[in-house]
Image (cartoon, rainbow, N blue to C red):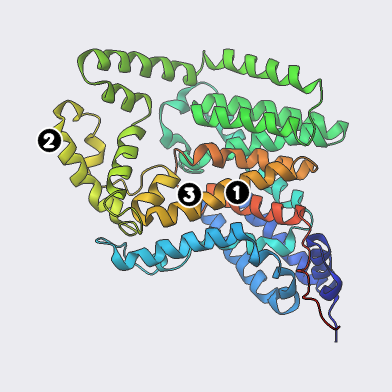
Amino acid sequence: MATPFAACLRADERLECAERVDPAGHAMHVAAAVAWGFAQSVSNAAEGITWGVLLVVSVLRIPKVWRCFAPVVRDPLWLSLLGWSLWMCASMAWSAAPPSGLKPWFPDRWVLTPLLLWPAMGRPWVVLGAIGAGAVVQVASVLWMSWTGVGLSSHMKMESISGFGQLQWQLHCAAVIAASGIRCLPLAGRAVAAIGFAASMLAVVFAGRRLTFLSSLTGSLIAWTRPSARRRVVPLVLSAAALLVMLALATPIGTRVLAVGRVAARSADREQPYVALSQLSGNRLPLAHAAVAIGLRSPIAGNGKGSFQAMLPGWAEAQQSEHPERAKALGSLRTGILNDAHNALLSAFSEGGAIATALLGTALLGLGVRLWRQSAASPTAGAALAVYSSILLGMLCYPITAKAPGAIIAVCLAVSWSMASVRPRPRASGTT
């Protein structure tokens, strides 16, 4: 007997079929997806629990909706992510210092998240809106704790709500989703979105992180100009950017940049320019140098998962012996506590070699190109691209984790699936 999926050629049609054949399961699936989207912006523990619920609901629905997965599991970008994750797991077989426990032997769970979300992505804004709502909670917490500037003196002020590193992604999400709302919502909704955008950008400025500031401006610009740029948008964006830049000069962003510049200038007078550049980059330069040097020891297959942390202290000691003036810049690298290169692609190269780097780079950059093309006709794809811009900027400074960066990749990949029509492969010529 033919199933409803037999006549479904497009992604949206398959999702509609999945909703029709299992309406009660669909409602639970959407609720689980919304809860996960909200929780991943608020709490690590809540995110893990809601992800587990989403997993259970997805597995229970498979007997009724498994045919809707047929197009997406063949997506080259998702296969690239899966291949990268499996290769990194396999690399523990030749690692000199493989991580302990069972978890590393399985693909990172965020790689599976797009499949868990997929049957609930008929209305992508439901999940994007939940992520934005959770991020607004973080915005409110930053404004509340940091209004006087006291909370900015210590990152530990944020730890009871979320790790400060994760908080940067959430502030960016709140800003760009609000910017998308200004573009897409009715008049009443635009007023609320405008308030949310102003509050989010103020929280970004208070947080005092240059990359978050740049990501928020970049994402907002994309949200306002895709799918089509309006003439009034350009002066608005330029005015907002100029205002925020001037505001930043009197905030921790400006003061920290100027302070680091002064320290770097003094270091350049006394020591090597390498030290000054290390300070300007937040010690990212020595980490990148180390990742390339360690990766070149086994450039094709990599040194294996966990090897970077084990090899880094020895590399730093050798560098200090050769260049004593770099001792201060290399200090944190000799402790043995840094377990990645703080760069998604360089981390992949140092531990997984050129194979892992190619797989991960194909997935990350390919998704950006796909969303850019889809955003030429779809405001939803434009919003996803705006949120995803933080990944393309941030992967140069951060690894990919199961929470914020991985969650953004998972949601944006699922959004891209819902935007593209899925056509069946042509049949071979012959009798029918």
List the single residue furthest toward the front.
Answer: 430
Which residue is labeled 2 in the image?
Answer: 321
Q: Amino acid at mark 1?
A: Gly
Which label's residue is closer to the chain start, 2 or 3?
2
Residue topped by disc 1: 366
Q: Position of residue 289 (x, y in %)?
A: 30, 38
Quadrant showing the N terminus? bottom right
Amino acid of disc 2: Ser
The three-letter amino acid code for the residue at tag 3 is Ile
The quadrant holding residue 260 is: top left
User: Is label 2 in contact with label 3 (beta carbons under 8 Å)?
Assistant: no
Residue 195 in percent (x, y) is at 73, 28
| Residue at horizontal 62 percent and vertical 44 percent from the top | 368
In the image, residue 409 above or below residue 86: above
Which residue is at the far left? 321
Q: Going by the image, does 63 lie left or right of 297?
A: right
Who comes first in sequence, dot 1 or dot 2? 2
Asked if labels 2 and 1 touch by Cβ distance under 8 angstroms, the answer is no
Q: Which element carries disc 1, helix, strand or loop? A: helix
The Cα–Cα distance between marks 1 and 2, rounded to whole angstroms, is: 42 Å
Residue drawn at point x = 53 percent, y = 63 percent = 82
Identity of the residue drawn at 58% across and 40% down: 170
Instruction: Residue 133: tell me if it is visible.
Output: no
The circle drawn on residue 400 is 3
